[in-house]
């Protein structure tokens, strides 16, 4: 079952912050985040594992709430280059088939304007 | 550094025709995947492979076949193309990983193949 992403779309001005959520009705062991620019391939951002800490770089980070089966991607002080569609992919186990088969959400389109 | 290479990049087919999409990776990855991406649907897994000579069905396998005769190549075949298979197809690969990270590795995507079926 596909994880649910929210919001579906968001428009930001440069410098503003955004949060993208990814929720699942199934128990999750890891959540992947990818960004895809129009006409290009998805690009890996980060993986969060169950029991792991919040991860990320200075301006793009993510968290994983095990109790809620939810992950959130935080983009702070957004830049024009952050524009694109963000996808979460969820895995249902630590190892074996469930760990490398990802189920992707439908994506969140982020537009950053000057 | 090529990464994951897909050929062709674009193709137009007529209903009923067959074709094969090729994916090649030079990262010595064990796992390879084929996805389709349709507007508003995200990425959906068609088939995947955990190693040379092995394949398995994903979420939307009907109408497609795959083969992985060599570790670096993963082929996706459409036996009798239908308009519903019009989509952008992405190939991806990932490392096996070890221990607790086994399987939980980043997927590296190719640039995609835009396929239109008339």
Image (cartoon, helix red, strand yellow):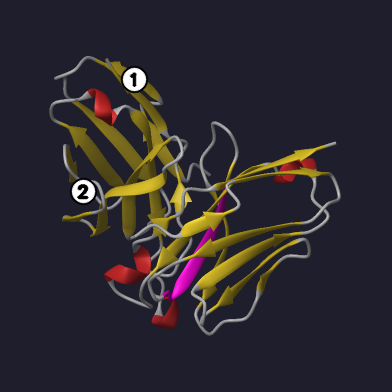
**Residue B48 image offset from top left, x and y in percent:** 27, 53
Q: Residue at x 19, y 25 (%)?
A: B81
**Residue under numbered circle 1:** B11
Q: Secondary structure at mark 1?
A: strand
Q: Is residue A66 above or below residue A20?
A: below
In terms of depth relative to the viewer, which is nearer, B66 or B29? B66
Q: Secondary structure at mark 2?
A: loop
Which of the two labelled residues, at mark 1 and mark 2, occupies the earlier sequence position?
1
Q: Residues within 10 Å of mark 1 (few under 14, many from 20)?
A: few
A27 sits to left or right of B54: right
Per the rendering, the mark at residue B68 is 2
Q: Nearer the viewer, mark 1 or mark 2?
A: 1
Residue B39 included in the magenta stretch of the image: no
**Over which residues does the magenta segment extend?**
A28-35
Chain letter behind tag 1:
B
**Residue A82 image offset from top left, x and y in percent:** 71, 46
Decide whether the magenta segment is chiefly helix, strand or loop.
strand
């Amino acid at each position: 079952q596909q994880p649910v992403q929210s919001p579906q779309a968001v428009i930001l001005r440069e410098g503003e912050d955004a949060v993208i959520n990814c929720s699942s009705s199934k128990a999750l062991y890891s959540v992947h985040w990818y960004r895809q620019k129009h006409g290009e391939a998805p690009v890996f951002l980060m993986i969060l594992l169950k029991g792991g800490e919040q991860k990320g770089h200075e301006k793009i980070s993510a968290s994983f709430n095990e109790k809620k089966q939810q992950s959130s991607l935080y983009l702070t002080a957004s830049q024009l280059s952050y524009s694109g569609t963000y996808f979460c992919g969820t895995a249902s186990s630590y190892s074996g088939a469930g760990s490398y088969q990802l189920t992707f959400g439908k994506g969140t389109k982020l537009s950053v304007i000057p | 550094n090529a990464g994951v290479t897909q050929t062709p990049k674009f193709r137009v087919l007529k209903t009923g025709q067959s074709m094969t999409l090729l994916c090649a990776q030079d990262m010595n990855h064990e796992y390879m995947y084929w996805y389709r991406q349709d507007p508003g649907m995200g990425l959906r897994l068609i088939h995947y492979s955990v190693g040379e000579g092995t394949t398995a069905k994903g979420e939307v396998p009907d109408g497609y076949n795959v083969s992985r005769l060599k570790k670096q190549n993963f082929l996706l075949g459409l036996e009798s193309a239908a308009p519903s298979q019009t989509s952008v197809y992405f190939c991806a690969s990932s490392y096996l990983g070890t221990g607790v990270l086994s399987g939980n590795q980043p997927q590296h995507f190719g640039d995609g193949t835009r396929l239109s079926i008339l």
